[in-house]
């Protein structure tokens, strides 16, 4: 808790703005986690389906495929972080 206060104090010193910690209700965190999992599944679905239609013949299509996979991993990681916070609250 003390480290968090030090971070908030440093942010206030740098930006000049007061920082507050938001308390989000548990049911909203659960909904956000589920939404994040679904968005992640959509990105992975796009990553697996798209090459069948356009092929991976150019650098551009490879970058699009890589971006889809990275976004799927990011949203899945975001969901894991939210789930961990939910279990800490309970």
Image (cartoon, rainbow, N blue to C red):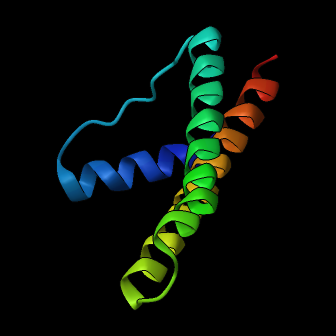
Name the residue rendered at 23%, 59% in the picture.
14
**Is 88 situated left or right of 26 in this image?**
right
The quadrant where residue 27 appears: top right
Indicate the quadrant containing the C terminus: top left, top right, bottom left or bottom right.
top right
Q: Residue furthest left?
A: 16
Indicate the quadrant containing the N terminus: top left, top right, bottom left or bottom right.
top right
**Is 65 situated left or right of 26 in this image?**
left
Can residue 2 be seen at all in this image of the molecule?
no
Name the residue rendered at 20%, 41% in the picture.
17
Q: Nearer the viewer, residue 69 or 1?
A: 69
The quadrant where residue 2 appears: top right
Compared to residue 86, the image places residue 63 above or below, namely: below
**Is 54 situated left or right of 19 in this image?**
right
Compared to residue 54, the image places residue 30 above or below, namely: above
Name the residue rendered at 36%, 83% in the picture.
60
Residue 75 location in percent, x, y?
58, 48
Q: Nearer the viewer, residue 29 or 41?
A: 41
Residue 86 location in percent, x, y?
73, 25
Residue 25 location in percent, x, y?
57, 11
Q: Nearer the viewer, residue 6 or 43?
A: 43
Residue 84 location in percent, x, y?
77, 36
Name the residue rendered at 66%, 39% in the picture.
79
Q: Residue furthest front?
A: 53
Q: Nearer the viewer, residue 70 or 82?
A: 70
Compared to residue 28, the image places residue 45 above or below, namely: below
């Amino acid at each position: 808790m003390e480290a968090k206060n030090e971070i908030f104090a440093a942010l206030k010193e740098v930006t000049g703005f007061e920082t507050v910690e938001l308390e989000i209700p548990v049911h909203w965190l659960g909904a956000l986690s589920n939404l994040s999992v679904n968005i992640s599944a959509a990105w992975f679905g796009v990553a697996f389906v798209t090459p069948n239609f356009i092929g991976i013949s150019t650098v551009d299509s490879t970058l699009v495929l890589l971006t889809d996979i990275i976004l799927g991993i990011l949203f899945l990681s975001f969901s894991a972080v939210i789930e961990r916070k939910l279990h800490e609250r309970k």
